[in-house]
Image (cartoon, rainbow, N blue to C red):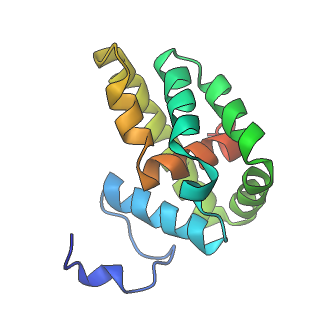
Amino acid sequence: MDDDAGQDAPLDLETPVVDDEALGERITQAIRRMGVDPNALLPRSRVEEAAAAFQDGEPDRARQIVRRIAPAAVRSVSRRVLSDAELKADVERYVRQMARQLAQAAREDGEGYSVLSRLATDPGRAFLLLDAAVGDLA
């Protein structure tokens, strides 16, 4: 990944997505281009709270955590996603995929380490913002 030639190229929503990891990176870059930094908005302690909510099977509680600590970012991301049909389709797909993966991780790992490790990444934090913004729709 260090010598990835595509890393310097601008990411756009017309680039076909071939796998889940590429979709996560593309979505994360789209959020950053909106002027939203998921890492700055969601410190590890808040990610841990959200991970515990997902581990307990309470995604609504995780959404409320994110909405409480980053309300302006959630509204901004929501408006942007809802106004762009291509982005909305990608976001809905990504949110559904991640939610399934988190639910499976929660079932398989009773301690919650797997859920936390997924959410503590850039794509995981992007998911938290997107899920808070449009998770009810996906």
Quarter of the image where the N terminus is located = bottom left
Q: Position of residue 53 (x, y in %)?
A: 56, 22
Viewed as shown, does residue 64 lie left or right of 91? right
Q: Using the image as rendered, state which of residue 68 and residue 97 is in the foreground.
A: 68
* 136 relative to 90, above or below: above
Viewed as shown, does residue 85 lie left or right of 109? right
- Look at 67% across and 71% down and name the residue there: 35
- Look at 64% across and 39% down and name the residue there: 135
Q: Which image quadrant is residue 24 in?
A: bottom left
Q: Where is residue 66 in the image (x, y as percent from the top left)?
A: 67, 39
Q: Where is residue 60 in the image (x, y as percent from the top left)?
A: 66, 25
Total marks placed: 0
Viewed as shown, does residue 123 lie left or right of 21? right
Quarter of the image where the C terminus is located = top right
Q: Where is residue 103 in the image (x, y as percent from the top left)?
A: 42, 24
- Look at 79% across and 47% down and name the residue there: 71
Q: Using the image as rendered, state which of residue 7 and residue 86 is in the foreground.
A: 7
Q: Using the image as rendered, state which of residue 26 and residue 118 is in the foreground.
A: 118
* 44 relative to 116, above or below: below
Q: Which image quadrant is residue 19 in?
A: bottom left
Q: Which image quadrant is residue 120 in?
A: top left
- Look at 52% across and 57% down and name the residue there: 90
* 125 relative to 101, above or below: below
* 107 relative to 22, above or below: above
